[in-house]
Amino acid sequence: MTTVVGRVLRGVAAAVVLVTVLAGCGADDSGGDSGSAADGEIGGTLTVFAAASLTEAFTTLGEQFEDAHPGVNVEFSFAGSSALAEQIRQGAPADVFASAALRNMEQVVSAGGITGGPVTFARNRLEIAVPKGNPGSISGLADFGRPEPRIALCAEQVPCGVAADKVFAVAGVTPQPDTREPDVKAVLTKVTLGEVDAALVYRTDVRAAGDEVTGIEFPEAEQAINDYPIAPVAAAPNPAAAQAFVDFVLTPQARSVFATAGFDAP
């Protein structure tokens, strides 16, 4: 009886092995990226440091990335690119850095904080934002030089502040801001709350605000278009997920999200 049972058990084990092998062959034959062995190894927390102007687009992409990789939990830190670059240089545990300007990315690259070469994935331009109803009667960039309107701009070291200074120089306007904010979302908040009559933000921020603000385009914006680069961080705690997210941001699916948000293609 013992011998017979042993033969049965050995037969069952062999069948299990055969089924496993066949299942593996079937997976290999599928050829789909989402079912590859490499994708299956991606998991854990992915920390992305991203420019504040990417908040809406990256939040959407983060959800899509998690859907494609159920083992990954994406966490974002949105802020001014200059502040994020400094945090990474100081050793903050980030996996990916997405900047609103090449200059801030280059600062991290120079410090040895980036793996490989950064890739530009989107472009953005400034637009005047005014509260609903335009109570300050703002019509163009020249109004930022008048003393009467309450004006908000990004801080000088932040990409949106650098771009603003460039367009004012092109237009020959000396702005008189009442406040300089640490990132573009803080500037936009001043507009939506009616605390200022006008501000310079990105076109994507005007679109994200919906009917809370009105956007006014101006020709000088063409002289200060920002390129947005992305790259894995050299000391990334989760390098596999970091590279996978960077690759995802470059896909047609992601570019559709950027286009909907108002970004230009690189």
Image (cartoon, rainbow, N blue to C red):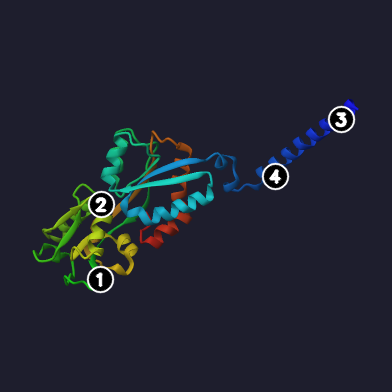
Kindly check if marks 4 and 1 are in contact, taking CB atoms under 8 A apart as contact.
Answer: no
Q: Please state which of the two labelled residues, at mark 3 or mark 1, is closer to the viewer.
A: 3
Q: Amino acid at mark 2?
A: Asp
Q: Is residue 250 visible?
A: no
Q: Quadrant of the N terminus?
A: top right
Q: Residue at x 36, y 61 (%)?
A: 262
Indicate left or right for 84 with 44 as reference: left
The answer for how far apart the CA atoms under marks 2 and 3 are is 73 Å
Query: CA separation, marks 1 and 2?
Result: 21 Å
Query: Mark 2 or mark 3, which is nearer to you?
Result: 3
Crowding at mark 4 (Cα within 10 Å: few <14, some 14-19, many 20+): few
Please name the amino acid that badge 4 sits on: Gly
Splitting the image into 4 quarters, where does residue 235 fall?
top left
Q: Judge depth for marks 4 and 2 and give the one in front.
A: 2
Q: CA distance from mark 3 to mark 4?
A: 32 Å
Q: Position of residue 72 (x, y in %)?
A: 50, 44
- Crowding at label 1, few (<14), some or many (≥20) Cα neighbours within 10 Å? some
Disc 3 is placed on an element classified as helix
* Quarter where residue 238 is shown: top left
- Secondary structure state at the residue bearing disc 2: loop
- Looking at the image, is mark 4 or mark 1 nearer the viewer? 1
- Separation of disc 4 and disc 2 at Cα? 50 Å
Q: Is residue 151 visible?
A: yes
Between discs 1 and 2, the one toward the N terminus: 1
Q: Split into 4 quadrants, where in the image is the C terminus?
A: bottom left
Going from N to C along the chain, the mark reached first, 3 or 1, is 3
The residue tagged 4 is 26
Residue under label 3: 5
Q: Which mark is residue 183?
A: 2
Residue highlighted by disc 1:
132
